[in-house]
Image (tube, helix red, strand yellow):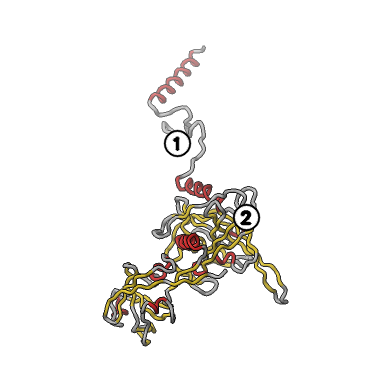
Amino acid sequence: MRPRTLVLTLVLVGTFWLLTSRGQWKLGDVIHPLTSGGRLWSEPVTAHGAGFESDEQNNIDVYKTNRLATVNITSVVYERDFFFQVYPRNGMGSGFLINEDGEIITNNHVITGSQNITVTLADKDKKQYKATVLGIDRRNDLALLKIRADRKLPFVHLGDSENLQVGQKVLAIGNPFGLDGTLTTGIVSSLGRSLQNEDGTALEGLIQTDAAINPGNSGGPMFDSRGNVIGINTAIYGSQTRSGEAGSIGIGFAMPVNRAKAILEEYRTTGKISHPVHGIRQVVFIQGQLAEELDLPASGGLLIENIDPGSPAEEAGLKGPDRVVLAGMYRLGVGGDLITAIDGVKVDGQDALRRAVNRKRAGEKLELSIVRGRRAMKVLLTLGSAAEAL
């Protein structure tokens, strides 16, 4: 070897030893030729696939666990056109299996008026079954269906909607625009929302979410991050699509799952679905200065505005208004009872009575703390029953 070549080799070997022994460089590092003594960037010799973040993995787990228990529901309603000819109109929605025997929860509006309800499973065979309506709850826009399969079916687990928090994560699975098995995620945006139902009645105590809810999602499950059902996707505010249907703008609503659990318990017990009635047709929540102007406690409560004749409320001795006054911007019936607490829980808003009744069944009692005139007293009200006609 020539002396010049030997010297150059020794210099290179020495430099390599010096850098690696001091931890400044190792095999696999890439040294930019324009740097002088430092690394601009480096990369490992072997590229490793990126793992999922914990939130991504949670989404994947909830979806895998519950996808097969979420079903597609197609209903057929026969209508007449302008020339009085009968034609079938197809509707679509979602639902979810609640046990291995084929019972399904969905929205009542998904199947209303239908003479033919078909349930399509989410498995690879997309097997279809004719569904039977076991019962409906129009007040909460819920329906209980049943299919008879030749095997045990996957099902979801029902959670608890009583202690939801604004900001907590939610996930929805459904069939928006017929795109089966679609997952969307978001948060609980608000609680206790009210919305007018298709028949003009009010849907109250709804969960508001920014998870994308679209036509076809109705009746599908809303999950918490543990994969438990906390709501039934029910309605949206949305803009019109080319097909004339409303599309999601990030404001969707779900019926709390505890409403569904109540009708399920009643069905198991009585074989039918009804709803408890109290006969207090109208109440107004008042407090503060307005209550004081009416010579009522400032802490306020629900002022009874109307009672149905012959109802449980009338039988319990509750009193409605005896005159009408203008109080500020309000026209109120006054002189009736003010409900200040229900079953020992202070009235805190307009929907306090509805929330209390939704936890009860027909035949059970409500203990109402009331103010009549200047006297505080308690009244026991036994809830009646109103059966839901299919």
Is residue 33 at all visible to an observer of this figure?
Answer: no
User: Residue at point 27% right, 79% down?
Assistant: 375
Describe residue 275's horizontal placement relative to residue 121 as left or right: left
Mark 2 Cα shell of 10 Å, populated few (<14), some (14-19), many (≥20)? many
The residue lying furthest to the front in this view is 270
Q: Position of residue 78 (x, y in %)?
A: 67, 69
Describe residue 359's horizontal placement relative to residue 138 as left or right: left
Q: Position of residue 123 (x, y in %)?
A: 61, 49
Residue marked by disc 1: 40
User: Residue at point 55% right, 71% down?
Assistant: 198
Residue type for callout 1: Leu
Q: Secondary structure at mark 1?
A: loop
Residue 340, compared with residue 34, is above or below; it is below
Mark nearer the N terminus (1 vs 2) = 1
Q: What distance separates the C-alpha of mark 1 from that of mark 2?
A: 57 Å
Residue marked by disc 2: 120
User: Residue at point 37% right, 73% down?
Assistant: 381
Q: Quadrant of residue 16?
A: top left
Q: Nearer the viewer, residue 325 or 305?
A: 305
